[in-house]
Image (spheres, grey):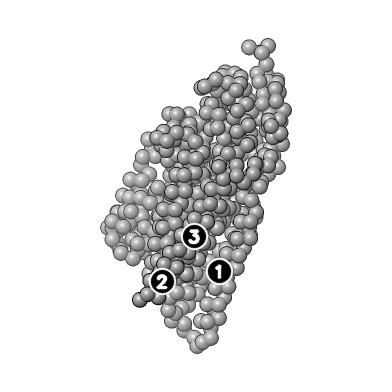
Amino acid sequence: MEQRNGNKNLWRAAFAMLIVGWALVRWALPMDVDEGLTLTSSWQVSQGLRPYVDFFEFYPPGSFYLLGFAFKIFGSSYVVARLLTMVLALATAWGLDRLCSLFTKKPLHRFTVLALWFSCQVFYPFVNHNHYALLASIWATYALILAWRENRAGWYAAAGAAAGATAWFLQTRGAALVLAGIIVVISTRRWKNAAGYLLGLLAALAPMLLVAPFPVLWQHLVVFPFLQYAEPNFVSPNLLFATFALLFAVAVLAWRTRLSASGFWPLWLVAALQLFTIWSRADIRYLALVLWPLPILFVAITAHRWEWPTVPPWPRIAKVFFYYASFLLVAQLIGWSAIPVSAAFVITPHGNVRDRFLLRDPFWSAVADEVVRRTGPGEPIFATPYIPATYFFTQRPNATRYNVLLSRLHPQDFFAETVASLERVKPKIVVRVLGSFAVGRGFHRDGTVVDHYLDTHYHVVMPTVNGYTIQILERNSEIP
């Protein structure tokens, strides 16, 4: 008995060390430019603006209203956003552990699943709609598997509501979970389950109509991403194909061994459908967002008794193979995570580790100080092409509807509308980056009609800010 209690205490200490270590690493990582877009849109919502109506967005409104509500209560700061996200991530770590416990109670398996998931989170911006969709998808899957195991309409209603909540954060991830739920519901052949699932789904999605009318939501959340997002963001799907091949091998082995783990196939279905949500961006950063079901599937395969239709040693060989595949995957992810996530997004180098840990970014501090010094509270500014955090850190409204304006992503009429807004509002200060990371990544080309307008109507008052490659422009006084 004493040895058993000692082992429990040892595993509890190991879990605690894992969580604390992850929290310290995650907190110290520098801010990514994609986080700036989420921060600014959320701040604008906290100021009473509506996405799709008052400012342009093609992501669902969930992250904006979540953070906007927090900003209303605790104030608009990066610390508030990081703390809230940290709490949600840790709560979801508990949910992921509960999900893993449905297949095994072994602490080593559960520890491995959490460790892999935490390492995957290093790849992507923390305060971001993709990350919130990741957290929501875990809870939605947990509810769906409980619904499958319990076969009750109430659990299916909860699964539908959770899938709908995921769609509030990312439309593709939500659609994958809704489709998985529909397939699972049909497999039960019980109309009561179907009714519960649909009621939960509609209850979660219906309030989105309060944000904007359905035609506006359809245009921004479906039509625009489908027509504009995929082509400039497309990367080779080789990594996606390799992952799906591994997932397919897991399914074949589970079928051949007559795996009896209840909930395995709904989880496998979620894993497969989630892979398709990153089709246009199948790089390691986006793949990390949808890998979390894989280690649980490996656990289910290795932790349950097999009914292998042939003689040994094939079961042992297959187990060794999947253990090897699991550890190889972990090693690859840990190796990739050693590369700074924001390397491709840094305009110029960030400060030291102490600044990062205290969330004091010298770049944004320098830019915000200059803009605030040259403008008054509530005075509109404009930042281009992809530095949306400027509005958040300066607490200055955008003179246009567009927080981001990239030539390969946004159509030309957006640029014309921006010029018209600049001519109407005439903001005194503009912040601009030429030759930005977006240019290097092929998302944007300098020299747009907006650049021509700025070159004509503004002059450079600061070619750099504290050594950072960013311009501060001021409107020419002789132009009315």
Camera-near label (1 vs 3) is 3
Residue 175: x percent and y percent? 45, 51
Residue 456: x percent and y percent? 70, 20
Q: Earlier in the sequence, mark 1 or mark 3?
A: 3
**Which of the pair 116/228 is nearer the observer?**
116
Q: Earlier in the sequence, mark 3 or mark 2?
A: 2
Query: Is residue 311 placed above or below 392 in the rendered structure?
Result: below
Query: Is residue 293 placed above or below 369 in the rendered structure?
Result: below
Residue that mark 1 sits on: 326
Q: Is residue 295 left or right of residue 367?
A: left
Say what amino acid the circle numbered 2 marks.
Gly
Residue that mark 2 sits on: 6
Quarter of the image for the N terminus: give it.
bottom left
Residue that mark 3 sits on: 17
Q: Do we see residue 284 in this rendering?
A: yes
**Which of the pair 172/380 is nearer the observer?**
380
Look at the numbered disc 1 and give the secondary structure of its residue: helix
